[in-house]
Image (cartoon, grey):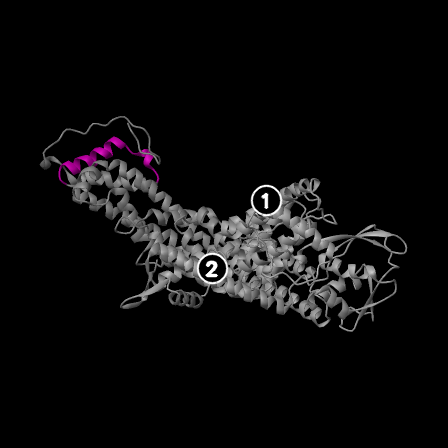
């Protein structure tokens, strides 16, 4: 005989009994057997029952058209049982939850026990009523025995109209979660069993679990209030780093809570609540706290806390944008301080009458590089290399760098210093790292054409005076600039190297020429032939009276050069050259390397007896040098480290009333001495103004050339699109204002390169 147990067992196939006419079936007898069996199942005595006999009763009732009565009878019997159980077992423990939240778990345990027993009973009842479920239930679109039993548990127990079971269950579940949030240990198993129960029971539509209406909605609502109150309390009591750690812990706790005894579908909902209440509503408060807010975290390089702030802020709308704004403000503040320090130093040196030294430029660039390196570290280690943060950081750097009008000159001087001496002894990798960092700053410059002007001047000095450590490194830097700005930006710089190479070849040929020449120069001569469009040379050479031996030597070279390059004209620029002189003093002889202008001045003293002075005005007349050039030259030989001349009266500045004499008592350990012309390494305000005027003039030509290129290609174009295309072509060199482009368009119309279209003044035509 087969028997019913608490768990399903494998049974042999039971054949249905043969059909009999409905009139022969006694309903009451069969129902009584089934009724007693269901009661026995509820009493946990299923082992006493015959499965085959009970199954046959249900089968017979269905095939004899008693399906409806059977279904309703089973439903009523289950409902009565559940009402009795709820009244006798659940209701008595509800009061415990009212008096002690911690003890409210007893409600969950009783509910858990009743639920599990009910599910077990439903499984056994489904086995004996399987024929009813497959036929009558399907035909009438009713819930099967198991599902019907779940609905009955929902309506009779959970949502009982007689007892406040639902509200107590909700209260106990929420109390248990609150206790756990406050650090108490709870019975997670009991909570999990009840939430699983609510998840298994469905609403009438058969899709939504009652978990949502009977628990989750209230859980979300109460959690919002819990975290609102907690966040306001924590943000008052803790500094931002500790507050953020607590927020992070809460997010982790809620994720684990959903994983352990709620449901994964609840996790994004409760996560949103924590993010809204603990992060979104306190963004500015956390960022702007004086005690370890964003600024202090940045100042102290608290990478871990910055990383946590980034991850938390990125969770909420506008969080990342607020953080980016805070970063940008701090960078601009630091940049403003760097610029202000340089400005203060500039004013101080000017007031003292001291030329602006290159140290000022080096300090500014190095401080900007150090700041950029710090934020590169923040970006990599705290902001996950987030592109939007990188853009915000770069934008802030670009903003404050371009507020310093000397930034292009400072950057060029910084590179100049590195290429002349700082790279000595460094490996190729070390050099490349420094140049890459400098190129990054160059990228932020809006006036790249101004930088180009200074770079040409400094490169010219390095090449002509042999100060560059390596042609390879020089070319490497130019390659980096070409990548940033294109060939047009660096073509003249590359042309300067070509001139140096060709000049070396030319001097080799000149030496061969002299071997067979009758007329040779009275001194050794080395000439660098410069292409005027490549080099930063003045259109008119600085006026001066060259000594006869200089003139004679230059004439010899000119004859040689014109014989090889017919039609070319050479213009001598004495201000760009240097001379080696052998000077005899009382103690010893020295070889002096001086500028050509200094050589012109010193040679005047050759025919003067020792101790005799020459007035400034006489020197000015004999050399023919402009006053500013002459005074700087005299400063270098009379007021610098090596005083070849003695100035009277003694002072730093050169006056028209000063007199000079040869310092025959000069003494120095070195036999070869290099004397540099004293000059401002950084432009003065007037020089800066002059540079900008020249740049503005060059920009007019660049803008007109761009306009012509666009119109030659397009033939006809409206005003707005022409402005847009011209800006696109020029923004790699500088950022042209639309008003400036408009003026250049008008100038081209006046010169008949363009015309306005008849009938529409906003459209231009190109005139071939």
Q: In the displayed structure, does residue 112 sit left or right of residue 629?
A: left
Question: Where's the N terminus, which quadrant?
Answer: top left
Question: Where's the C terminus, which quadrant?
Answer: bottom left
Whether residue 684 appears in this view of the structure is: yes
Q: Nearer the viewer, residue 672 or 687?
A: 672
Q: Which mark is residue 118?
A: none
User: Residue 58: within the magenta?
Assistant: yes
Give the residue at mark 2: 702
In terms of secondary structure, where does tag 1 sit? helix
Magenta: main secondary structure: helix
Which range of residues does the magenta coloring cover? Answer: 44-65
Q: Position of residue 404 (x, y in %)?
A: 59, 65
Report the Cα–Cα distance between label 1 and label 2.
Answer: 35 Å
Q: Residue furthest front?
A: 518
In terms of secondary structure, where does tag 2 sit? helix
User: Residue 5: within the magenta?
Assistant: no
Q: Nearer the viewer, residue 26 or 69?
A: 69
Q: Is residue 440 above or below residue 225?
A: above
Q: Which mark is residue 564?
A: 1
Q: In the displayed structure, does residue 141 sit left or right of residue 489?
A: left
Q: Nearer the viewer, residue 12 or 42?
A: 12
Q: Earlier in the sequence, mark 1 or mark 2?
A: 1
Q: Is residue 107 above or below residue 401?
A: above
Q: In the displayed structure, does residue 470 sit left or right of residue 37?
A: right
Q: Is residue 515 above or below residue 330?
A: above
Q: Residue at x 40, y 46 (%)?
A: 113
Q: Position of residue 505 (x, y in %)?
A: 63, 42
């Amino acid at each position: 005989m087969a028997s019913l147990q608490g768990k399903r067992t494998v049974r042999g196939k039971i054949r249905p009994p043969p059909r009999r006419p409905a009139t022969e079936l006694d309903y009451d007898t069969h129902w009584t057997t089934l009724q007693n069996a269901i009661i026995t199942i509820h009493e946990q005595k299923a082992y006493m029952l015959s499965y085959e006999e009970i199954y046959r009763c249900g089968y017979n009732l269905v095939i004899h058209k008693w399906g409806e009565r059977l279904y309703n009878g089973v439903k009523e019997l289950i409902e009565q049982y559940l009402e009795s159980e709820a009244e006798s077992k659940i209701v008595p423990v509800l009061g415990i939850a009212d008096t002690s939240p911690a003890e409210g778990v007893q409600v969950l345990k009783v509910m858990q026990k009743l639920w599990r027993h009910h599910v077990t009973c439903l499984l056994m009842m489904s086995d004996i009523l399987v024929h009813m479920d497959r036929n009558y239930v399907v035909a009438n679109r009713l819930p099967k025995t198991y599902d019907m039993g779940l609905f009955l548990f929902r309506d009779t127990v959970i949502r009982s109209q007689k007892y406040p079971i639902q509200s107590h269950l909700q209260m106990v579940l929420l109390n248990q979660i609150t206790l756990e949030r406050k650090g108490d240990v709870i019975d997670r198993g009991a909570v999990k069993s009840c939430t699983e129960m609510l998840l298994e029971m469905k609403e009438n539509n058969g899709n939504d679990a009652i978990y949502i209406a009977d628990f989750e909605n209230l859980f979300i609502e109460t959690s919002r209030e819990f975290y609102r109150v907690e966040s306001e309390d924590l943000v008052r009591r803790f500094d931002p780093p500790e507050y953020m750690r607590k927020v992070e812990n809460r997010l982790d706790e809620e994720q684990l809570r959903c994983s352990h005894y709620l449901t994964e579908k609840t996790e994004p909902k409760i996560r949103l609540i924590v993010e809204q209440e603990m992060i979104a509503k306190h963004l500015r408060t956390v960022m702007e706290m004086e005690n370890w807010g964003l600024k202090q975290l940045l100042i102290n390089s608290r990478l871990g806390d910055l990383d946590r702030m980034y991850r938390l802020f990125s969770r909420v709308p506008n969080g990342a944008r607020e953080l980016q704004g805070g970063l940008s403000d701090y960078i601009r503040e630091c940049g403003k301080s760097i610029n202000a320090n340089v400005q203060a130093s500039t004013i101080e040196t000017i007031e003292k009458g001291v030329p602006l030294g290159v140290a000022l430029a080096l300090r500014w660039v190095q401080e900007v590089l150090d700041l950029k390196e710090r934020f590169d570290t923040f970006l990599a280690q705290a902001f996950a290399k987030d592109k939007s943060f990188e853009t915000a950081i770069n934008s802030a750097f670009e903003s404050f760098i371009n507020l310093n009008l000397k930034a292009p000159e400072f950057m060029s001087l910084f590179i100049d210093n590195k290429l002349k001496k700082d790279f000595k002894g460094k490996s190729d990798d070390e050099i490349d790292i420094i140049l890459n960092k400098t190129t990054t700053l160059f990228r932020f410059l809006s006036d790249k054409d101004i930088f180009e002007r200074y770079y040409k001047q400094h490169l010219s000095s390095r090449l002509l005076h042999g100060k560059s450590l390596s042609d390879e490194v020089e070319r490497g830097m130019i390659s980096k600039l070409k990548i940033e700005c294109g060939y047009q930006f660096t073509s003249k710089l590359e042309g300067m190297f070509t001139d140096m190479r060709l000049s070396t070849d030319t001097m080799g040929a000149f030496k061969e020429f002299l071997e067979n020449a009758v007329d040779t120069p009275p001194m050794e001569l080395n000439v660098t032939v410069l292409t005027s469009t490549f080099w930063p040379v003045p259109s008119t050479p600085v006026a001066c009276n060259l000594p006869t031996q200089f003139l004679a030597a230059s004439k010899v070279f000119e004859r040689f050069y014109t014989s090889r390059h017919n039609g070319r004209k050479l213009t001598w620029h004495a201000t760009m050259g240097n001379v080696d002189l052998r000077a005899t003093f009382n103690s010893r002889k020295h070889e002096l390397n001086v500028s050509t202008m200094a050589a012109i001045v010193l040679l005047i003293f050759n025919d003067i007896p020792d101790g005799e002075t020459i007035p400034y005005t006489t020197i000015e007349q004999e050399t023919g040098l402009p006053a500013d050039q002459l005074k700087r030259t005299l400063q270098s030989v009379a007021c610098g480290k090596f005083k070849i001349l003695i100035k009277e009266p003694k002072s730093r500045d050169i006056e028209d009333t000063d007199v000079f004499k040869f310092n025959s008592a000069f003494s120095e350990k070195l036999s070869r001495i290099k004397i540099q012309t004293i000059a401002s390494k950084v432009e003065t305000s007037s020089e800066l103004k002059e540079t900008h005027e020249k740049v503005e003039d060059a920009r007019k030509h660049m803008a007109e050339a761009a306009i012509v290129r666009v119109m030659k290609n397009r033939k006809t174009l409206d005003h707005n699109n022409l402005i847009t295309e011209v800006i696109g072509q020029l923004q790699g060199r500088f950022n042209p204002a639309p008003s400036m482009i408009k003026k250049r368009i008008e100038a081209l119309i006046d010169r008949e390169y363009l015309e306005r279209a008849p009938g529409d003044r906003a459209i231009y035509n190109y005139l071939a």
